Amino acid sequence: MLDRSKVWTGSINERALDPQPPGTVGLYDTTLRDGEQTIGVVLTPDEKLEIASALSAAGIDRIEAGFPRVSDDDFEAVRMIAEAGLEAEVWGFSRAVQADVDALVELGVGASVIESPISDGKLDALGVSRETMLERIRAAVAFATDHGIRVAFFGVDSSRADLDFFDRAYEAAVEAGAAEVVVVDTLGIATPEAAALLVSRTLDRLDVPVHWHGHDDFGLGTAAAIAAVQAGATWVQGTINGMGERAGNADLVEVALALEALYGIPTRLDLTRARELSRLVAEKAGTPLPPWKAVTGEALFTRESGAVAAQFHDPPAIEPYASELVGAERGIVLGKKSGIDSIRIAVERLGLDVPADRQAELLAAVKKLGTQKQRLVTDAELRRLARRVTA
């Protein structure tokens, strides 16, 4: 449970928000499948197992272990993760294709997404009619459920589907045995309001849990996921670090922090593990993060500005939540934008003997060096500058 005393967002959100859904939102991670679709990313079965173990330890509820028919390695990764005894539920992934579902049955996977395109644009591109696709959905879902697999039907590009066919596709899947459904914004085109509309429409017609799966092409991945939850979705699908095709998927860590800190909606994610989880995935995938990345960026709790350093002793004055909530540490760095308080803090941290009346001179030297080098000043450089001004 999030420590509310370490969230410093004021009262404006409470004033603006209607009462929020009271239940815990489940987090469904697809880093190992949709995340690996990031260009150039290839994860070995052992790497996938390591990431899956970390996801489970951090409180992710469900892990999509992969799409077994992509390759022998993917098949093996799903097998290894399914047999690892993780606390998280392990899910597979399949198209509405018999051979895909056969692979799930062979692996003994207990639950799986089954996907099928339902927008006219996708159907036309594949040369498949609506009626043919409905038959494929019914057949695949029925076969999977007959073999003991819990199915969540995943309507690809559902945010661009004709709404009447949207209804027919999801209803057909549930009638065939799907226990859950996933509303899918494949190309990240849905506004938060559209996400809420689609989730509400689905819940009005079906009595099954609804997931939201969204992408970030317009930078609205987290916002759309929040809106879907407000409309009644009880599962959010996403990835660590927002990995995925094009602009990526909704970032599950961002979604979890926003839900808990801003909306008061609980998840089971241990946010103190957020940064170690982020680093692990970035390292294995070879996809470094920008330092300003929300929640997990390395620069979020590090200050260079002298104006901000003057308030460094009072975290709520300069930060929206405590660094320890997400497993981060606070710090001051020196450079062109430093101020006298930056020097004071750095000198104390390094135990340097620089009298107060010489610190302004040291600041000037730091600013000059940072400007010349067009980068931060290192601790070693600060020590050398300190020796010069006190010599």
Image (spheres, helix red, strand yellow):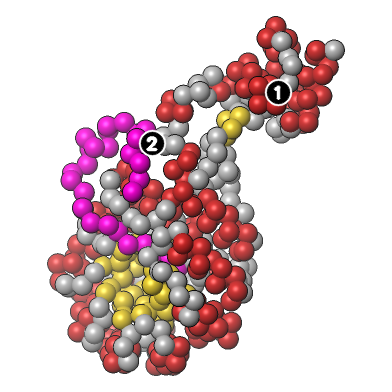
Other residues around mark 1 within 10 Å, as few (<14) / some (14–19) / many (≥20): few
Q: Which mark is residue 6?
A: 2
> Could you tell whether 51 is left or right of 336 in the image?
left
Magenta range:
1-30
Q: Which mark is residue 37?
A: none
**SS for dot 1:** loop
Mark 1 vs 2, N-terminal side = 2
> Could you tell whether 219 is left or right of 288 in the image?
left
Q: Which dot, 1 or 2, sits closer to the camera?
A: 1
Seen in the picture, residue 204 relative to 391 is either above or below; the reply is: below
> Could you tell whether 306 is left or right of 134 in the image?
right
Q: Residue at x 45, y 32 (%)?
A: 319
Q: Tell me the kind of residue under disc 2.
A: Lys
Q: Residue at x 73, y 14 (%)?
A: 354
Other residues around mark 2 within 10 Å, as few (<14) / some (14–19) / many (≥20): some
* Quarter where residue 215 is shown: bottom left
> Could you tell whether 135 is left or right of 66 in the image?
left
Viewer-proximal residue among 239 and 96: 239
Question: What is the chief secondary structure element of the magenta stretch?
Answer: loop
Q: Tell me the kind of residue under disc 1.
A: Gly
Q: Which residue is mark 1?
A: 351
* In the image, residue 14 lies in the stretch drawn in magenta: yes
Q: Position of residue 210 (x, y in %)?
A: 26, 68
**SS for dot 2:** helix
* In the image, residue 178 lies in the stretch drawn in magenta: no
